[in-house]
Image (cartoon, rainbow, N blue to C red):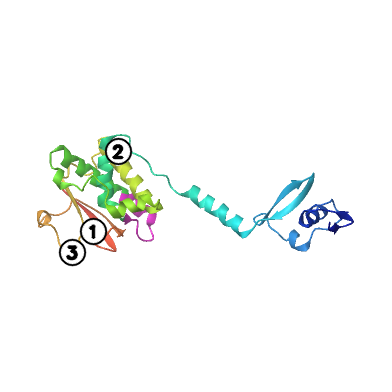
């Protein structure tokens, strides 16, 4: 059995830890004194306090747990109407994110654009023009972002749900407007919008959604 300070221990590492912690009779190792609370923690072994340094893997596991806790949770619709309108708005705007130095203001503008899209889509559905709105099944690329729990995709989904709820509650920020569109890649304007001036314009927003929307920036236009 190894001898540690005149005492015998089956486990030499355990013995050194205990002997190194006995009051002030034995000074703590210099490297131990330099440890910060981020790198080590105290435990009690047989009534003695021992400083244990965390391994790098322990630190990484703790960081992973903290990062996981910070991830936003996916909010779920409470009705079929909420689900359908949320999916439509998400399909239209799920690839858009705030742009520029005024990100907070741009995020509010993006939410307003989603509310506008929700209001107009709701009117189209109620008037029997389902063909004017996006599909009510999530597009593949956007679905993958939610499946992978991508925080950006989750934020876009939750914001689309919030916009859908506003529209279903009777919001009318678009003043009965009937159409909206996003910038197209080719810069072309759809036939129905040619010669018409938009009543509202939102953006520009950063766009990673693909489809026929222009990248890397896109605006949302509302038409009466």
Whichever of labels 2 and 1 marks the residue nearer the N terminus, that label is 2
The residue stretch that appears in magenta? 96-110
Residue that carries the numbered disc 3 in the rendered image: 187
Q: Position of residue 171 (x, y in %)?
A: 25, 38
Quarter of the image with the N terminus is: bottom right
Q: Nearer the viewer, mark 2 or mark 1?
A: 1
Of 81 and 55, which appears nearest the observer? 55
Mark 1 — residue?
Answer: 211
Horizontal relation, residue 110 to residue 212: left or right: right
What residue lies at 77% left-to-right and 63% top-to-bottom? 30
Q: Position of residue 169 (x, y in %)?
A: 27, 35
**Is residue 224 something one can see in this rendering?**
no
State how far apart marks 2 and 3 are (Cα).
32 Å
The answer to whether one can see residue 65 in this image is yes
Q: Which SS class for mark 3?
A: loop
Q: Residue furthest right?
A: 6
Q: Which type of secondary structure does the marked residue at label 2 adopt?
A: helix
At horizontal 13% and vertical 57% (from top left) the residue drawn is: 190
The quarter holding residue 218 reads bottom left
For mark 2, what is the residue?
A: 165
Q: Residues within 10 Å of mark 1 (few under 14, many from 20)?
A: few
């Amino acid at each position: 059995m190894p001898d540690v300070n005149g005492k015998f221990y089956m486990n030499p590492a355990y013995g050194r830890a205990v002997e190194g912690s006995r009051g002030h009779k034995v000074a703590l190792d210099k490297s131990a004194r330099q440890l910060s609370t981020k790198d080590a923690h105290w435990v009690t072994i047989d009534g003695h306090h021992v400083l244990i340094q965390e391994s790098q893997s322990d630190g990484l596991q703790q960081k992973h747990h903290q990062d996981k806790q910070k991830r936003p949770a996916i909010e779920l619709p409470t009705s079929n109407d909420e689900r359908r309108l949320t999916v439509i708005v998400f399909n239209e705007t799920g690839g858009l994110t705030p742009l520029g130095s005024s990100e907070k203001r741009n995020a509010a503008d993006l939410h307003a654009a989603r509310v506008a899209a929700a209001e107009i889509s709701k009117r189209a559905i109620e008037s029997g023009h389902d063909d004017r709105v996006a599909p009510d099944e999530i597009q593949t690329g956007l679905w993958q972002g939610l499946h992978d729990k991508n925080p950006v995709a989750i934020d876009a989904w939750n914001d689309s749900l919030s916009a859908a709820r506003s529209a279903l509650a009777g919001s009318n920020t678009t003043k009965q407007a009937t159409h909206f569109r996003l910038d197209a890649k080719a810069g072309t304007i759809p036939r129905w919008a040619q010669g018409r001036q938009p009543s509202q314009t939102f953006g520009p927003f950063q766009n990673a959604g693909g489809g026929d929307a222009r990248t890397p920036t896109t605006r949302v236009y509302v038409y009466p």
